[in-house]
Amino acid sequence: MCEVANKTPERRIASANIDLQTPIRTPVHRSVLVVLVLTFLCLLVFEATKEVLIPSSFTRWQSHWLTICIGTLISTAASFLIMRRFVLLTDELKIATDEELQRLAAVVENSNDFIGIATLDFKPIYINASGCKMVGIEGRNDFRALSIFEFYFPEDQQKLRENIVPAEIATGFWHGEIAMRHFKTGVAIPVEMTGFMVRHPQTQKPMCIATVSRDITERKRVESEMTLLNAHLRQRTADLETALAESEEFAYAAAHNLRSPLRGIDGFAQALLEDCGDRVGKEGREYLGRIRRSAQQQASLIDDLLGLSRLSRTTMDRQSIDLSELAQAVMKELQTNDPERQVDFVVQDHLAANADGQLVRLMLRELLGNAWKFTSNRPRARIEFGTISLAGGQLAFFIRDDGAGFDMAYMDKLFLPFERLHAEAEFPGNGIGLASVKRIVQRHGGKVWAEAAVGLGATFFFTLG
């Protein structure tokens, strides 16, 4: 504790020369006025009724003196009652003020912050227990002999004199960060300080300076760690961006180098078919056809892989998108490319989302294209695009078809690259489409899942964040 043992916290605060009680003068003036008024009224009443109250045998002087005595007794009794009430009121106010002072002292003394009070010539006259502990002060005399500037380091003392104290005098308030000095260890204690001028409630004359300082050592440590962590993350991000750029360059170079021989294989196989088809026979022509299809399929797979890798690096431009209109456009393209198909397409009107238009169009092309493909064995198919409400009120979009469906036991493989749940001969494809759908949905902060049954169709659900 920073005070001697025989000083209680409230006495220590009261000794700081702060006027915490307002003089009670109004009740005194009011009581005197009431006494005079009552005395005058009593005399008037007695004067009006004295002929009834005073016997007729009394002389004029006897009646006069009796009137004075009775009036004096009445006024004295009234004065006694009023003064007794005033004394009780004063005692109640004093008790209430003492209790308020004790509560204030308890709050200040038990605060974890440094709370100090200094005179206008910068001499500390009160520091709470936590404040003494914070700066390494043990006894009362240890801080009373100091100046408030000695609580800070030389480089901050100039800041106090030139900025902080003038601000408190001019505006009555200053708030900011500064370092206090630990008197025993000399260690700097970073604090968030609020300094303010205490003024007399009536005259507004400055009385003293008060300071509340909070130790922010832990906060500064965390901020320092966060700064180092952010620098490390920035470096890692830069390294990853460099690695991705190099990977992209390698992918394009590899794709170009792979395409060239594939184009050569496809071209020479076609030349053999055209120039020497009659000499290689039927079986030879079939082999050459397989070679061409394999080369073309490999080239398409390379293009799809490059497209999948670009989905993670494409800059997103989110805006309000009319999904109903996009879906209608995709279905029109599918119907144009395969006009013989009989498909009923049902789309919910005015479906909108905040998303990247190009990515969402690619996603709908993959999902609706799958629905179109896997309903190809039906003479008349049905594809539906709409929304459902999930738990918590979130909206999810769905694309439902009545096609081939799939076994839910293989659900965990559905969105992985190159994973196919149907034979190539039955439903052609390269196994990249649903992986692209998942990546697009994840870039929008959403999720995608599916429900299906073999021979009964499938429903794909997705959210867009």
Image (cartoon, rainbow, N blue to C red):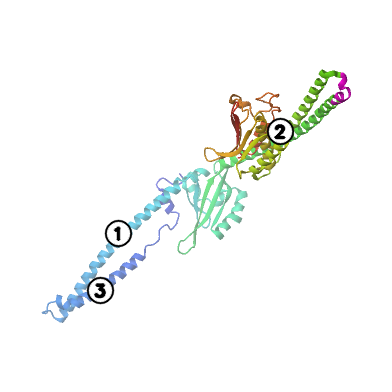
Q: Earlier in the sequence, mark 2 or mark 3?
A: 3
Q: Which residue is mark 1?
A: 88
Cβ atoms at labels 2 and 3 below 8 Å apart: no
Judge from the rendering whether residue 314 lies leftward or rightward of residue 119; answer left or right.
right
Q: Earlier in the sequence, mark 2 or mark 1?
A: 1
**Visible residue check, residue 256:** yes
- Vertical position of residue 54 compared to residue 152: above or below: below
Q: Disc 1 and disc 3: Cα gap in Å?
A: 25 Å
Can residue 239 be seen in this snapshot?
no
Which quarter of the image is occupied by the N terminus?
Answer: top left
Residue 235 x/y as whole percent: 70, 37
The relative height of residue 424 versus residue 172 in the rendered view (above or below) is: above
Magenta region = 270-279
- Mark 2 lies on a secondary structure that is helix
Q: Which mark is residue 308?
A: 2
Quarter of the figure with residue 404 = top right
Gap between marks 2 and 1 measured at Cα: 89 Å
Mark 3 residue crowding within 10 angstroms, few (<14) / some (14–19) / many (20+) = some
Disc on the earlier residue, 1 or 3: 3
Q: Position of residue 234 (x, y in %)?
A: 68, 38
Q: Residue at x 37, y 55 (%)?
A: 97
Q: Secondary structure at mark 1?
A: helix
Residue occupying image coordinates x 32% and y 57%: 91
List the residue tagged with mark 3: 41
Identified by mark 3, the residue type is: Leu
Residue 2: give x, y in percent of width and height: 46, 46
Q: Residue at x 81, y 18 (%)?
A: 283
